[in-house]
Image: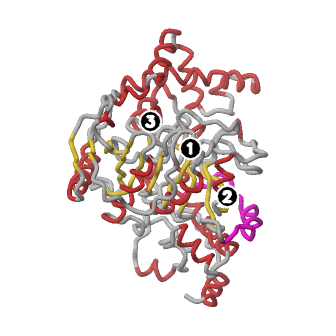
Amino acid sequence: MSNISRRVFLASTSAATISTFTSRIPASAAIASLRAHDEFIDYDALGLARLIKEKEITAKELTEVVIRRNEALNPIINCIATQAFERAREKAPVFSSSATFAGVPTLVKDMIDVAGLRRSDGSRLLATNVPNKSVKYIEALEASGLNIVGTTTVPEFASGLESELYGQTRNPWDLEYSCIASSSGAGAAVAAGFVPLVHGTDGGGSNRLPSHACGTFGFKPSRYRMFSGEADGGHDLFKTNNAISRTVRDSAALFNDTEDKSGKVYEPIGRVTGPSHMRLRIAYAPNGVKGYPTVASIREAQDEIANLLADLGHRVELIEHPVNGTEFFENFRFSFLPKFRPLLATVTAITGRAPAESGLLSRWTATMIETSRNFTDDQIKRGNAYFENAEAIYGGIFDKYDLLFTPVTPDETPRLGSIKPSESWDEKGHLFERVMSITAPTNAVGDCAIAVPLSTSRLTGMPVGSMFQAKAGSDKMLYELAYELEEALPWKDKWAPYSAKNIPV
C-alpha cells in the first residue's frame, strides 16, 4: 500500500473503546463490516520494523496505532498495569532506523526496573515504586529499537493466577479463562494483538504457561545467558528475561540483542534465523512429573505432536518424567518460603496489623509466607540441600537425549477465579503447584525451555502448548526446533476472538 493511503488510514481511524463483552465475538460478515481495519495487525515486530526502515510508516505513527489498540482492547482484556504513552511518544522519533526494531512499540512486564516507570510487582506494597535507573537488560532491549509503551499485569510477587491490585486479566480466546502465571498480562497482550512482541520473565514457567493459555510462543533462556535483569547487576537463581511473541524470529532477534556476549558462561549463539537439518533424540514424557498426572485431553494433544516429530524424522522415545514433583515442591517450600518472612514483619511494622489484614498484601501472599513459620530447622536445611544439587532431579536425562518433550502444564487452562488472591495458600496452594509442576523444575536447574502453540483442546477449544526443554546452554537448538515446528504447523495467523484482528480499533 502506498504511503498516501497509509496516511489516510492513520488519520481516519479513531479509537473505539468497548466497555464490556459478555460472549465470544462471532467471526461474521456483520462484525467484519463494522471493523475499522488495522492494516498493521498481521505484521510481526520485524515486519513492522521493515515498514519503518522503508519509510512506509514512522515509529511515532506506529506508536499511535498501538495506543489506539490499547484504548479499544484493554477495557476488555485488562492486561496493562501502567501506561507509558507520553514516554513512548517522546522516544519514538529518537530510535535509529538501523536498530533491529527501529522504534517498534512493545510492553514490558511489571517486574523489572525501567527508569521513570512504575514497578509494583503486582503488589500494593510497591504501588508507588518508581525506579530511577533501568537494569542492563532493559538498556539492551531499548537499544534494540523497541519502544516501551507500558507494563503488563502480574499477580502479586509472581504468585497465583490473578492480581488483586489490577484485577483479573482475561484470556483473549475466551474471557472466562485465565492467562496463567505472572507473565499473564504479557501473554494476553500478544494474543490480543496489542503488540506482537512483549517482554516477560520466567521464574517458574511464566513465559511458558501464559503461552500455553494464549496460543503464543514463549522462551525461557538458560540461566546467566541474558544481560542482567536485576538492579544489583547479578542474576536471580530462578528468573530469566526474554520474550513472548507471535513469531519465532521476533523472539530470536530480541534474544540476540539482549544476550550477554561476554562468553563468561556460554559462548553467544547470536541470531538464529531458521531450522537445523540435525535430527534430535527426544524423550517424550506426556504424563507429567510424578505426583501430578496429566489429564487425558492434554495428553491427547501432545500425542499428536509426538507423531508430528516422528514424521519430521526426529527419534521420539516414550518415557516417564524423571522428576518427582511431590518431592520437588516439598523441598521448594522448605527452601524458599522462609526467605520472605522479613516481608511479613515489614508489613506489620507499617500497618500495625497482621499481614493478611494489612491491606498491603493479598491474603494469598500473606498466608503463603506465613506457612513457612511452621517449618523446622531440619526441614529448611533439607530443602536447601536439595537445591544445592538441583541437576540431580532430572537423573542425567540429557546424557541420553537432546530434548525433553512434555505438556506445559498437566491441566487445561483454568477458568478465572479458580485461585483468587483473596483465598488462602493453605487451602489452594497445592493447585498452584500443580499448574507449574512441569515448568518450575526447569528453573531450578537453570535449563532452557520453550512453549510452542501447536494444538487446540478438543475439550475446551482453548490453545494447548507443548514444552521442549534442553540442557543449559542449548538455547540455539530450541530456536532451531521452534522454527521447524512453526513451518510445520503455522500459528501466527490464528487469531483470538478478542483481538485487534476481530475488534474495531
Judge whether residue 162 can be spotted in this image. Answer: no
Query: On the rendered image, what quadrant is the C terminus found in?
Result: bottom right
Calculate the distance from the C-alpha at mark 2 to the C-alpha at mark 3.
29 Å
Query: On the rendered image, what quadrant is the N terminus found in?
Result: bottom right
Amino acid carrying mark 1 in the image? Gly
Which comes sooner in the sequence, label 2 or label 3? 2
| Residue at image coords 76%, 26% | 350
| Residue at image coords 75%, 26% | 351
- Residue 440 badge: 3
Residue that mark 1 sits on = 263
Asked whether residue 180 is drawn in magenta, I would say: no
Q: Nearer the viewer, residue 279 or 191?
A: 279
Residue that mark 2 sits on = 142
Asked whether residue 85 is drawn in magenta, I would say: yes
Give the extent of the magenta segment.
Answer: 77-97
Where is residue 293, by image quadrant? top left
Amino acid carrying mark 3 in the image? Ala
